[in-house]
Amino acid sequence: MACMQSESLADVITHTLCMAVESDVRVASRIGGIHGVLAYLNARTRYRFTGIYPAPSPVDGSPLCRAYLYDRETPSLGSEPDCFPALPCLDAHLIGADGAVRGRLYHVDHRLRTAAPSEASLLQFLASRADRWLDA
């Protein structure tokens, strides 16, 4: 189920949720920057970590955006991880204004976690519109 208008009631509800959360993400970005966005998104789930992992540039291999990590158990440690946790996760590709993949937006945990199906749609929706909040 994608976050787009559709004929089914479930799709309309999901679209409405996506638009409301996107508005909250913009507010969180203005107030707390990327750390605020990740904290907000993390609070919607049971996952311990929420982060952004950059994609390498096809030109020189340098990251296309900075890496960030929000840790629910130690939120005061900042938002730059040493590495991406190689664990099962819920993720979506971050898409820049030019349509290029800039990285991944993800939730991950050391313990097995599940999320509502709408959370996967929401993550994909927000990641596809990252240019609206990532650099805000």
Image: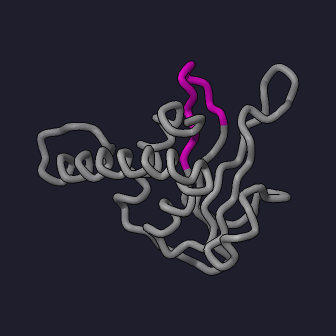
Name the residue rendered at 85%, 30% in the picture.
Answer: 61
Q: In this view, does 55 lie above or below 81?
A: above
Q: Which residue range is magenta in the image?
A: 92-102
Residue that extends furthest to the front in the rendered view of this protein: 31
- Identify which residue, 43 or 1, lies in the foreground: 43
Q: Is residue 122 above or below residue 93?
A: below
Image position of 54 (left or right of 109): right
Q: Is residue 106 above or below residue 108?
A: above
Q: In this view, does 105 lie above or below 43?
A: above
Name the residue rendered at 79%, 58% in the picture.
Answer: 81
Residue 53 belongs to the span the image colors magenta: no
Task: Estimate the x, y position of residue 106 in percent, counting from the top left.
Answer: 59, 55
Task: Estimate the x, y position of residue 101 in percent, counting from the top left.
Answer: 62, 31
Task: Estimate the x, y position of residue 2 in percent, counting from the top left.
Answer: 33, 44
Image quadrant occupied by the C terminus? top right
Name the residue rendered at 78%, 27% in the picture.
Answer: 57
Image position of 2 (left or right of 48): left
Image position of 105 (left or right of 1): right
Name the residue rendered at 44%, 44% in the picture.
Answer: 26
Residue 93 belongs to the span the image colors magenta: yes
